Image (tube, rainbow, N blue to C red):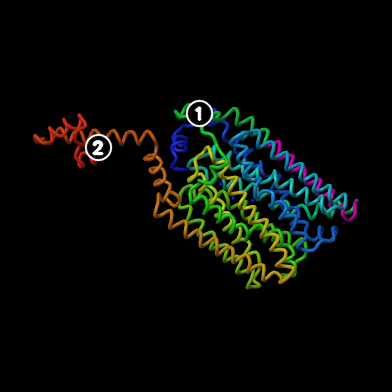
Amino acid sequence: MDRTSSDESVLIVNDRKPGANNKCYRPLALFFMCFLGFGSYFCYDNPGALQDKITKDMNLSTSQFAFLYSFYAWPNTVLCFIGGFLIDRIFGIRFGTALYALIVFIGQLVFAAGSLWDSFFVMVLGRLIFGIGGESLAVAQNYYAVLWFKGKALNMVFGLQLSIARVGSAVNFIVMGHLYDYVHKYYKGREALGVTLLVASAFCLLSFLCGAILAYLDAKGRPTPEKEADSSGEGKKVVRLSDALFFPAPFWMVSIICIAYYIAIFPFIGLGKVFFMRKFDYTSSQADIVNSMVYFVSAVASPILGYLVDRTGWNVFWVFVATLGTIGAHSLLAFSYLSPYYAIVLLGLAYSMCASALWPMISLVVPEYQLGSAFGVAQALQNLGLAVSTQLAGLVVDAGGYLLLEMFFLGWLFVALIVTLVMWIHDTRNTGILNMTVAQRDLYEIQKSPSMQQVLITEDVLDAASNELNEPQSEQDVRNRYLSKLGEVNIPPHVHRTLR
């Protein structure tokens, strides 16, 4: 659209060196991983790029048009979590990814058919099906990234994925209007709209092919879960639906930030075209260009900012800075008539930074075997927020105009800012892993690894034994140690403290 725990199983994965096959296949896997979501993101904003055409050809109000986004999100308030759980427990990452990409393709076909049949209900149904596959596919994409690139490169990989995804979204805004105009030479009204959406479905087919190729590469270049478990010396852990109830507090804070922050991004882009046409007197094509600038800026900035986060750490700090930047961008759009390009460029940079720093934090606090479920829960909660807020945004525009809509977005951004501060304080008072530098995080993970824990315990015992041998013992000490073996007295507390 923007995803290491202290748990021992995750730390073992970090200590494991990739094999030769893994190193050879990683560049190819990264390529197809990035393009896996291209079709989904391209078609997600088809309604936004064709907002004026859809409302005219299908005779819709703004609030009715908003259903095309909210019904994408509604099913994923539950199904997105289930999609992640199914990857963890039943489908596996390879089959699950291909299946979700296929559902995306089917959903786009139904969406196009609704326009051809002059049925808004079928169009909404198509968006619902599209959403079921699209968000679960995003969960699978994030999961693949963690499985292949967990460690120092993860933030940059998330940035690259976001970059390619946003290229898809930006190309949609540039291409779809012109494609509609070309098709309109041969078809009229809703038929032109339907054919245009049908052509766009080819990009969803591209995502499915990427999923199939990535499954092959994953089978060749990455150990199976059973082999990973054997190499780490532990059995394969079973994921349960109830596990989500016990995710740590930082995970839920990250999820709340996702909800509050993304409300100010995607609903704004979905309804932004008409905003630019009304406030800045732009033509339809000019409005498409400025609306797509968020995605173009994000496409360029995401891998760069992801690399910055990889080099520095400080994830919470960067999320805080990104939220402040987004507040500044929306304030410019709401309260000034300065060229919107300044605000949109700032919005694109801030959005890229937030996505690159925010989503990888989930892998820092949730064990790897639960990551599919964790990303699914976060995505589900995000979609709940988007489903409600998109519909509310349409009602706000119909009732009070776009200035009131900007105030609505700013309110949610301040919620995100406050929760980020709370998470920062909570993290500082606990492990501090979310806002550590890269070097601090590496040291923390090494110290928490099972092998290092055994070394530290052994060293403590040897030091204690050495101290006892070097220190003269009184007759009372000798007597107490003898009696403790018989169970008559306990070893003195100071010895317990030394050996503990």
Query: At x 51% / y 62%, what residue is drawn?
Result: 418
Q: Is residue 62 visible?
A: yes
Which disc number belongs to residue 19? 1
Residue tagged by mark 2? 499
| In this rendering, position of residue 217 left or right of residue 280 | left
Closer to the N terminus: mark 2 or mark 1? 1
Measured as percent of width and height from the top left, residue 428 is found at 40, 55
Q: Main secondary structure of the magenta part?
A: helix
Residue type beneath disc 1: Gly
Q: Is residue 464 above or below residue 433?
A: above
Crowd tier of the residue under label 2, counting other residues whose Cα lies within 10 Å: few below 14, some 14–19, many 20 or above? some
**Circle 2 sits in a helix, a strand or a loop, which is it?**
helix
Crowd class of label 1 (few under 14; some 14 to 19; many from 20; radius 10 Å): few
**Residue at image x 61%, y 69%?**
332
Above or below 494: residue 298: below
The image position of residue 91, as x and y in percent, is: 64, 33
**Residue stretch in magenta:** 187-210
